[in-house]
Amino acid sequence: MPPLCSGQHRQAQPGRGGMGMDPEKRAEQQTAAMTEKLSLSEAQSAKVKEINLKYAQKAKEMRDNASGDREAMRASMVAMRQEQEKELQTVLTEEQWQQWLKIREEQKENRSERRDKAKDKKKKKPEGSENR
């Protein structure tokens, strides 16, 4: 019989999207991606890394102290993300900011598509299951 895994154990494992990743590594990866996609200068990259680290640490604290109220957690995360975006906007040029907004929108659409595909898979019954 396979061992049972608790939700905490699965959540602590790094995977796609950086779940379970420490804030420093998360900030590093976010900054590297932004530096490449937005052609950030060294000075911009350093400031963006500071911002990303600050908010990655805040997000970790929020997850660690979560009370189980998913809606409250989601609202807090959305508010925090808005704060982060305001700070990032002060570092980026107008052109970079517009490109960043476009990238964020594409990421949102991709997440939505993946969620829809996952829901479709759950709805489909395995072949032959209706005869059981």
Image (cartoon, rainbow, N blue to C red):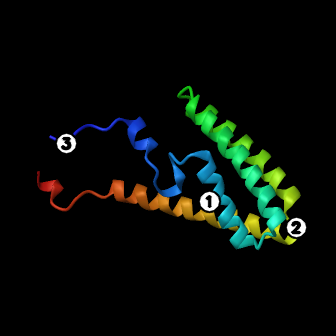
* Mark number, residue 86: none
Residue 125, by quadrant, is: bottom left
Element type at mark 3: loop
Q: Amino acid at mark 2?
A: Thr
Q: How many marks?
A: 3
Q: Distance of mark 3 from mark 2, alpha carbons?
A: 53 Å
Residue sitting at 70 percent across and 72 percent down? 37
Q: Tell me if mark 3 has few (under 14), some (14-19) or many (20+) residues whose alpha carbon lies within 10 angstroms of its own.
A: few
Frontmost of labels 1 and 3 is: 1
The amino acid marked with disc number 3 is: Pro
According to the picture, the residue beneath numbered tag 1 turns out to be 29
| Residue 113 locus on image (x, y percent) | 52, 63
SS assignment at label 1: helix
* Amino acid type assigned to the residue bearing label 1 in the image: Gln
Which residue is painted at 46% across and 54% down in the image?
Answer: 15
16 relative position to 28: left or right: left
| Residue identifier under label 2 | 93
* x then y, percent, for residue 124: 31, 58
Read off the residue under disc 3. 2
Kindly indicate the quadrant of the structure image that contains residue 93: bottom right
Q: Position of residue 74 (x, y in %)?
A: 62, 39
* Residue under the point 73% across and 44% down: 54
| Dot 3 or dot 2, earlier in sequence | 3
Q: Please say if 61 is above or below 104.
A: above
